[in-house]
Image: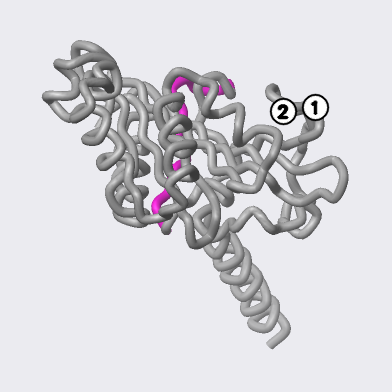
Amino acid sequence: MRKILFKLTVVCLIVQSCQSQSNFDLSDITLNENIKDLPLEKLDLYEKDFFLSSEYSGYTIYDKQFLNFEEVELEGQIHANTNYKRNRVYFWFSKKDSIISILEIDLYTHDECTDFVNVLIEKLGNPDFRRYGDKREKERDNPSNYLWEDLINKRTYFLNVYKDYETKKYKRAHLYMLKNSDTIVYPIMFDFPEYGYYGRFIDERNKKQDPTYTYQQYLADKVKRGRGEYENYYTK
């Protein structure tokens, strides 16, 4: 009888462990969580500063439990026995209050990159902005950068993708999710050439005081005025 009870206890613990692992999903992160409330106590963590601002600190995590997005498993690696080019997530939090301010997901394996891009489009809808490497890539609708603005929840998703020129397979998919209210890193994102055009669009939308004004309308307006040559060439 004791053996049976022991076996049942072990089975229950295993089931509970599996359930707890499957319950964590990165798509549930709202950027309002305290890093101390995440179940990270069993992980061997190394804290470091965010490269764009020392006001944020963060952890790099490779653990399978934390690599799920909309129930899509994102675990994977290119090289065995090393973290080089291994899929990972970063939680960046404010040093002042430990609130997570930036979610960063960095993937290197083709299948997981493909699934991730597809599930982002499924979750967030068509991107508000796409940027292309050149005109040919735009004609093929093969973006190198995507942006989604969630005006309801007041956060923005910046996704950079890299593909092999010959095979067209993903080499990397790299996402930053930030609060629109962030005054440190969020404005810097629009200083990068990949998203500079969208930053200028936001300035124009603010001038119009029209939250329904879209980047596509902005682009069409510029073309009508005989401007927007580069925007029309590289973006959509």
State the residue position of label 1: 54
In the rendered structure, does residue 70 fall within the stretch colored magenta? no
Judge the density around disc 1: few (<14), some (14-19), many (≥20) Cα neighbours within 10 Å: few
Left or right: 105, with 58 as reference point: left
Is 139 or 17 nearer to us in this picture? Answer: 139
Q: Residue furthest top?
A: 166
Which colour assignment does the render follow? one colour
**Extreme front residue here?**
225
Quadrant in the rendering for residue 200: top left
Q: List x then y, in percent, for residue 128.
A: 34, 44
Structural crowding at the residue carrying mark 2, measured as other residues with C-alpha within 10 Å and reported as few (<14), some (14–19) or many (≥20): some
Disc 1 residue type (three-letter): Ser
Q: In the picture shown, does residue 222 fall above or below 100?
A: above
Front-lying residue, 140 or 37: 140
Q: Which mark is residue 50?
A: 2
Q: CA distance from mark 2 to mark 1?
A: 6 Å
Residue positioned 61% across, 48% down in the render? 179
Q: Is residue 75 magenta?
A: yes
> Where in the figure is residue 156, as x and y percent of width and height?
50, 45
Magenta range is 71-82
- Specify whether 60 is left or right of 173: right
- In the rendered image, residue 93, in percent from the top left (x then y), is placed at 75, 43
* The quadrant where residue 204 appears: top left
Query: Where in the figure is residue 159, as x and y percent of width and height?
Result: 42, 34
Q: Determine the residue positioned at 57% across, 37% down.
A: 104
Mark 2 touches mark 1? (CB < 8 Å): yes
Tag 1's secondary structure? strand
Q: Residue at x 81, y 33 (%)?
A: 55
The residue lying toward the viewer, choosing from 201 and 161, is 201
Q: Which mark is residue 236?
A: none
Quadrant where the C terminus sits is top left
